[in-house]
Image (cartoon, rainbow, N blue to C red):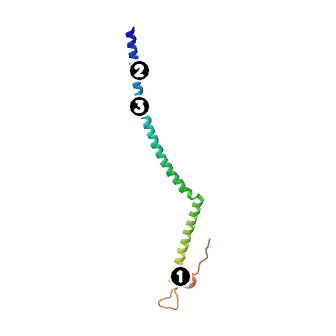
């Protein structure tokens, strides 16, 4: 009787000790996994914060000029380029006029081309 009950109690206590050790090991494993995942989450958050900073910089740069302002700038650049081409054409025409209206080396009183060649031609659209 008593010895048998005492052995059952000892076996029960031993079983509880094993269960407690098992739970401790599971708790340590769970804690380790939790800390690992927490570190991964913190790393991911840090990477996302950096990405957000980069995106905000890009957005800030893009918002410096509105689409309308960018369109107007492009229009102004295009107009300036057209004026540059016209100016270059005018310079070439003037150079041609100077070349053909300069005095002939044989006859200093006459030119090689009439002055009418230097007059502006009317634009035709």
The answer to whether 96 is drawn above or below residue 56 in the figure is: below
- Percent across and percent down for residue 79 are 57, 68
Q: Which residue is mark 2?
A: 16
Q: Is residue 3 left or right of residue 102?
A: left
* Contact? badges 3 and 1 (CB < 8 Å): no
Mark 2 closeness class: few <14, some 14–19, many ≥20 residues within 10 Å = few
The Cα atoms of the two marked residues, 1 and 2, are separated by 113 Å
The residue nearer to you, when weighing 26 against 125, is 26
Q: Which residue is mark 3?
A: 28
- Depth check, mark 3 against mark 1: the one in front is 3
Which image quarter is the C terminus in? bottom right
Mark 1 closeness class: few <14, some 14–19, many ≥20 residues within 10 Å = some
* Contact? badges 2 and 3 (CB < 8 Å): no
Q: Residue at x 59, y 63 (%)?
A: 72
Q: Which residue is mark 1?
A: 97
Q: Is residue 92 left or right of residue 16?
A: right
- Percent across and percent down for residue 116 are 58, 83
Q: Residue furthest top?
A: 1
Q: Is residue 63 left or right of residue 17?
A: right
The Cα atoms of the two marked residues, 2 and 3, are separated by 18 Å
Q: Residue at x 40, y 19 (%)?
A: 15
- Earlier along the polypeptide chain: callout 2 or callout 3? 2
Look at the numbered disc 1 and give the secondary structure of its residue: helix
Q: How many marks?
A: 3
- Earlier along the polypeptide chain: callout 1 or callout 2? 2
Which image quarter is the N terminus in? top left
- Earlier along the polypeptide chain: callout 3 or callout 1? 3
* Contact? badges 1 and 2 (CB < 8 Å): no
- Percent across and percent down for residue 30 are 43, 32
Any mark on residue 57, and which?
Answer: none
């Amino acid at each position: 009787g008593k010895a048998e009950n005492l052995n059952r109690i000892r076996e029960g206590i031993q079983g509880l000790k094993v269960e407690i050790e098992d739970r401790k090991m599971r708790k340590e494993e769970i804690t380790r996994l939790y800390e690992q995942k927490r570190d991964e989450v913190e790393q991911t958050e840090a990477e996302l914060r950096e990405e957000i900073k980069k995106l905000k910089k890009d957005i800030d740069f893009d918002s410096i000029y509105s689409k309308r302002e960018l369109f107007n700038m492009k229009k102004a650049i295009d107009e300036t380029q057209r004026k540059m081409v016209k100016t270059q054409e005018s310079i070439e025409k003037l150079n041609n006029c100077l070349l053909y209206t300069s005095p002939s080396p044989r006859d200093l009183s006459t030119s090689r081309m009439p002055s009418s060649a230097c007059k502006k031609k009317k634009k035709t659209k």
